Each structure stands twice: as structure tokens, then as C-alpha cells.
Image (cartoon, grey):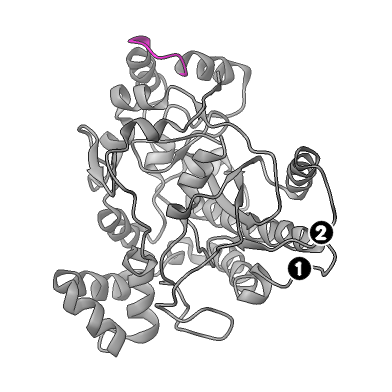
Amino acid sequence: MKKKIAVPTYIKDRVGKIERVDERDTVFAVHDLVRYFGADSAPAVEYFSRHPDERKFYELQHERLKLGSSGKEDAPFFASQFWALRMVSPACFVEGEPAPQKVTIDPARASAKIKGFAKFLGADLVGIAPLKPEWVYSHVGCSNGDRAGFSPRGTAIDLPPHTYAVALGFGMDHDLMQAQPFFPELLTTAKGYTSSAWVSIQLAAMLRGWGYAARAHHFGNYQVLPVPIAVDCGLGELSRAGYLLTKEFGLGLRLAVVTTDMPLASDTPVDLGVQSFCEQCKACARHCPVGAIPSGEKQEHNGVRKWKLDEKKCYAYWAVNQTSCGRCMSACPWTKPHTLLHKTMAEFASIKGPHQRWMAWADEIVYGRRERKSGKDFLG
């Protein structure tokens, strides 16, 4: 069951100050740096002077990674979705001026309306929480080569009036996920990101229509960290794989966030028993083809003891199949169809105890990790 708690489960693992993350240090931002500016450009030379061991990796990744090419004749299925995502990534879509007259709505009523509208637009999960400053990037890293509509790389990020965050979760197609690490998995990942982008920009525009500042944060233009925000909003918990794990979708969902200065009623963080389950399960770590997910104990990282995903190892594997892999999502025992059986098993899995180890073992025996087809006639 979803046990509501006063503070997120990561708080007990907090051992120091959490510093704001510089987006320029993320794998996507460094890849974009090489892609758009070139490895010999001034910003790249400056970055690699501080990280000399990374230059060869990112040059090779840029040369090898042709995401979606493994789809062959189906490759445009993926490309068309990311085209739609890119179309709504510039600033004119994610932010704007609020209406001059504020609409006065009770915070609880406003939150109910926001959730209802977001789900009407297509979100599967919606939660609201105060926006913590540590979850806002310190500087812009992904700027699409500093093209028009995007803040230049290195721009300091400041969202001072934004006091609340609305986390949006979008479930992925289970059949396509099971076809990992091949093209069908990439297709459902792209659909999740594209859907989250379009819903988040509409929700932000609606809040601005009420007269409040609001900004959408989606895969094409993040200024916040969506996973810890989603944890604060009560959607789920941080998992061993480093991703959000929810009771409804396991690891199989994509996220977007809308930040605003509108007074709202907050949701409560949840304890799903994930920390205990992940300690005993380790399926994602066992099935990761490159060992990017740790199988040991939590380690301190930026003020929090956590299982830290090795993003570079993960990202490097994308070039092997020209997809975003997805093995960890598929391997997770929580990532299951919405059947009565699996809903019942999720209830038991959320209760801490030695039975969690047996449930993980049984899942491995019953389902295994054999290669599966997507079940979609239009693919292949």
C-alpha cells in the first residue's frame, strides 16, 4: 500500500548539504556540447580542461550514437515523436507572461482542478509539493547549441517566485518495454517524453491564464530535477536503478514538471517499501548489460546516501543497439501490467520484510528475462 509519510524516504539517508546540480555536468549536456559546438570549440576546450579523461568518451559517443537507426524502416516513428518534442522546447512554449489579473481560488480547490485537468490531458500520475531550491539546476547545460529560444549554455538559473512544483507521470507501454533493449522500447520512451512535453506546456499555460507565473520543464527544456521532485510530490520513491519507482508503473514511466508561484495544497510523500525491496532484489543491477547500476550498499553522493547510477556506462550502451536500452525497467518486478494479480502483488511487495526477497526471486523464476516481441503488428 501507499503509506503516507511526513518527509520523503531519502531524508533518512541525508548526511550533508545537497548542492544544486550544474546541468553542464550531465551526460546529455556534455554530449550536446560536442554535438553542437564541437570538441575543439572554446566552451568544449574549457570543459575538457577540467575533465580531461572525458573528451575521448564523448567524441566517440557522438560518432557512434545514431539513436533510432536500429528501427530501420520504422525509424521515422521515433524521429517524428522527437520532432514534435523539439517543436515545443523553446522558451516561448515552456514559459510566458501571466495574465494581468490573478484568479483567486482556494489552494485545495486549485490543486484538485490542476490534477483533474492534467489527467484529462493525458497524465497518469499527478502530485504537488513545495519546490525545494536544491532541485533547481544551477546553470543551463542543454542549450541546443545556443540556438534561438533557448538560454545560452552557462546561464545561471533562477526561479525565485516559483514556490510549488506539479509532478506529472506518464506510463509507458508495457509490451513495448518488454521488447528491450531494442527499437520498440525506444519508441515507448519517446512517446512518454513527447506526451509529457505537450501536457506540461498546456498546464503551465493554464496556470498563467489564472494570472500566476508558471514554467513547464520537460525533456526538451528542463531547469529542474524531475525525479526528486516527483518523490517530494508523492508519486513514488528513488530506486536502486536511480529512477523513480511507482506502485502503478514500476520504473516504466516518464516525467515532466510544472513550477509555479500559485499557492497550492501539497500532497504527502509516500513509503512504498522500495528501499527495503531494492536492498534485497537487485534485479536491475544483475540485468544491466554494462554494470551501470550498483549491486552493493548505498554510497554518499551530494549529501545523500543512495545507489548512484553510472550515467556514462549507461549512455555508452545506447550506442550498442541505438536505443535507450530499458533493461532495468523491464527487469524490475514492480514493472508489470495493471492486472488484479499484479496489483495484489504490489500490495504485498510494499510491506517491508524477508518475503520481499522471495517475491523478487519468484518474479525472476516466473518471468525470466528472455527476449520478447513487442506485440505490435505495425513494428518490424
Q: In this view, does 253 lie above or below 183?
A: above
Left or right side of 25 for 254? right
In the rendered image, residue 34, in percent from the top left (x then y), is placed at 32, 79
Q: In this view, does 324 lie above or below 364?
A: below
Residue 28 appears in the picture as rendered: yes
What residue is at 55 percent from the left and 38 percent from the top? 174
Q: What residue type is labelled 1?
A: Pro
Quadrant holding the N terminus: top right
In the rendered image, residue 24, in percent from the top left (x then y), is placed at 35, 70
As for residue 353 lying within the magenta part, the answer is yes
Q: Is residue 235 above or below residue 42?
A: above
How many tags in the picture? 2
* Quadrant in the rendering for residue 294: top left
Secondary-structure class at tag 2: loop
Query: If you read the primary sequence from the N terminus, does the residue marked by circle 1 or circle 2 appear first?
Result: 1
Left or right side of 110 for 132? left
What residue is at 54 percent from the left and 48 percent from the top? 254
The residue furthest left is 53
How crowded pointer 1 is (Cα within 10 Å; few <14, some 14-19, many 20+) is rated as: some
As for residue 47 lying within the magenta part, the answer is no
Q: Is residue 249 above or below residue 39?
A: above
In the rendered image, residue 111, in percent from the top left (x then y), is placed at 74, 42
Q: Which amino acid does label 2 sit on?
A: Trp
Q: Residue 98 carries which label?
A: 1
Secondary-structure class at tag 1: loop
Quick check: marks 1 and 2 in contact, CB under 8 Å? yes
Q: Is the magenta stretch mostly helix, strand or loop?
A: loop
Residue 379 appears in the picture as rendered: no
Please state which of residues 248 and 5 is positioned toward the viewer in this rendering: 5
Residue located beneath label 2 in the image: 210
Q: What segment carries the magenta color? A: 350-355
How crowded pointer 2 is (Cα within 10 Å; few <14, some 14-19, many 20+) is rated as: some
